[in-house]
Image (spheres, helix red, strand yellow):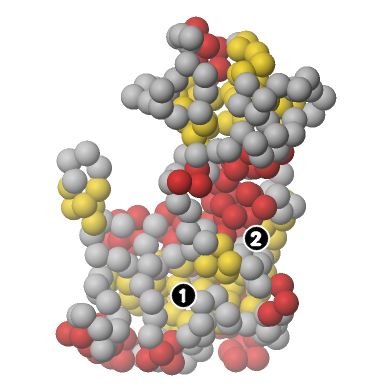
Amino acid sequence: MKVVFAGTPEFARLAYAAIVDAGFDVSLVMTQPDRRAGRGMKLTPSAVKLEALERGGEVLQPISLRLDGKYPEDAAAARASLEALQPDVMVVAAYGLILPQWTLDLPKYGCLNIHASLLPRWRGAAPIQRAIEAGDEYSGVGIMQMEAGLDTGPILLEKKLPIERMNAAQLHDALAALGAEAIVDALTKLQANGAEAFEPQVQDVAGVTYAEKLTKEEAILDWSESAEVLERKVRAFTPVPGAKVHLEGFAEPVKVFSAELLLDAEAAGAAPGTVLAREPEGVDVACGQGVLRLKELQRAGGKRQTAEQFVLGWRE
């Protein structure tokens, strides 16, 4: 069974590596063009490209796949490569390019997407962060048969896990590993049974929610919200875009990497944003409801510090 893999970041790299390690014939890898990154703005290949080159894979990096878009020649070249290959299936994971209908129709079994949520909940750009922010008990991955709509296709296979106290970085890594496992399971079934391998589950439109892209503005926390909500936001926005708070004595917002909800603490009528304690264990702040303890912080222009280190340098 010929497989084409389309993906770009670390989340996708794990899936690609798992597919190859499972013995599948990945005949072509598609990934985003190299981007300038880092302080030196050096041209940097994607995580998937680096993995593919290390394994001797063929890599294609079209700017666009839209034949009627700004780069029709690029799209046409990609189409010619895929038509010559005649893949059985394309696996898509955080690729970053919109797949036009010709791409969806070309593989024998279509295109399978690894989506990091329990669809139809959290379609869209930031499913991991929004699940944490909303206080969902579970997240997971779905292997979805792709359609033209945004994450609208039927679910072929699903795996879930409890979110517990994970932040976005931790949940990302857990779901990346789970997604790699899920896509290998799906391809194994597809290879053995073809089109009869699955009983596709149509998404219930009543359960649809959208995971909007994160913004830097929403990462500045509002102390009038409850401590429970703010603790979830700290986890949801770590590491990107990074939760920030206004604290007494600091002209610029302070970044918060970890926080703890103090279940038994009382703000005793203190206004939201009031610092109640500055101890080695944490900086306790009154919220609209409850108290939040800040445990890892970083002042503007400074380094990430434990609360104990942070309070030593605090100036009123």
- Residue 280: where, in percent of width, then height? 60, 11
Q: Which element carries disc 1, helix, strand or loop?
A: strand
Q: How far apart are marks 2 and 1 (CA)?
A: 18 Å
Q: Where does the image place residue 296, in percent across and percent down from the top left?
A: 54, 25
Q: Which amino acid does label 2 sit on?
A: Gly
Quarter of the figure with residue 26: bottom left
- Tell me the quarter of the picture where residue 83 sits: bottom left
Residue 161, horizontal then vertical, whole percent: 70, 55
**210 lies above or below 238:** below
Identified at 44% across, 65% down, the residue is 94
Q: Which residue is drawn at 78% across and 20% down?
A: 268
How many residues crowd around disc 1 within 10 Å: few (fewer than 14), some, or many (20 or more)? Answer: many
Q: Closest to the observer: 68 or 160?
A: 68
Q: Where is residue 252, by image quadrant? A: top left
Asked whether the residues under the numbered discs 2 and 1 touch, taking CB atoms below 8 Å apart as contact, a structural biologist would say no
Q: SS for tag 2?
A: strand
Amino acid tagged 1: Val
The disc at residue 140 is 2
Of the numbered discs in the image, which one, if any, rests on residue 209?
none
- Locate residue 166 relative to residue 254 in the image: left or right: right
What percent of the width, then of the height, locates residue 260? 67, 29
Left or right of 228: which side holds 188?
left
Q: Earlier in the sequence, mark 2 or mark 1?
A: 1
Say if residue 315 shows up in the picture. yes
Say the numbered circle drawn on residue 91: 1
Above or below for 106 versus 155: below
